[in-house]
Image (cartoon, grey):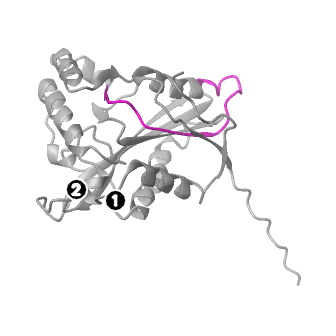
Amino acid sequence: MKRTRRRPRPVPELNLRRQTESLGVSADLEEAISLLQGTRDGSAVPLLRLYRPLPTVAFGQRDRRLPGFEAAAQACRRLGYEPLVRRAGGRAAAYHPGCLVVDHIEPDPDPIVESRDRFAAFGELLTDVLVSCGLDARLGEIPGEYCAGRESVHAVGGGETGAWSSDRRVKIIGTAQRVIATGWLFSSVIVVQGGPSVRRVLSEVYGHLNIPWDPLTAGAADELRPGLDVDAVEQAVLETYRRHWRLVPERHEAVTSG
């Protein structure tokens, strides 16, 4: 009996935008929302957007209602970070040019049905990114972490100086999702460098907000893998994505503030 050869499944296509300069603290966030809103009129295409943000502390909606919010915002500015309040939930998270933001936007006629699974799927993908960079990366919340999430990505190690315990767990990637009726946005922040700066600003912010957390859970990938930089992590993101999508660079993928 002759077997029928199965046709290979087509590889999904994903436009690639490597944003070379920040548009500004608020504008970077609004750009992602604008791209998501484009799914309403059919103008949006599946898109992967990568950029390095300006120093920012993104507060959750609940943070703004706490008595210490204004003092926390002032502390951010004093330390060179711009405070903003994001539309999504969660707690305060800090990032800067030593981080890489990964925005994945897709039109979807039924974006709710897989919204929970999406966290796990992207968490596994991002864990693979860090493993390919030489980290002992794992998926799951660390007790006492900032902006806690079940699908946070953390890494385990003793740190560059050897002063940390060999089983210290450090949150490296936080993720967030926004869903509308016509599509979804999945955003991830990878903290690659500048761990001490993140710990310092979050220590002040969480102190003013009176939210308990463990500062030892905050850090950067290069504290566990010395010499790692944002360029290397960006390449690892692209290589990992290419195992699942066909990336098509936008004709004018360099988006700048000018």
Looking at the rendered structure, the secondary structure element under dot 2 is strand
Tally of marks: 2
Q: Residue at x 51, y 36 (%)?
A: 20
Rendering quarter of residue 200:
top left
Tell me if residue 41 is in the magenta stretch: yes
Task: Write the start and end of the magenta stretch as one range.
Answer: 37-58
Q: Residue at x 13, y 59 (%)?
A: 164
Looking at the rendered structure, the secondary structure element under dot 1 is strand
Q: CA distance from mark 1 to mark 2?
A: 9 Å
Q: Amino acid at mark 2?
A: Arg
Left or right placement of residue 177 versus residue 40 in this view: left
Q: Residue at x 34, y 62 (%)?
A: 135
Residues packed near mark 2 inside 10 Å, few (<14), some (14 to 19) or many (20 plus): many
Residue 169's disc is 2
x and y percent of residue 31 in the render? 52, 25
Q: Amino acid at mark 1?
A: Arg
Farthest right residue in view = 2
Farthest bottom residue in view = 1
Q: Quadrant of the N terminus?
A: bottom right
N-term mark: 1 or 2:
1
Q: Quadrant of the C terminus?
A: top right
Q: Circle 1 is placed at which residue position? A: 138
x and y percent of residue 217 in the render? 20, 48
Residue 159's disc is none
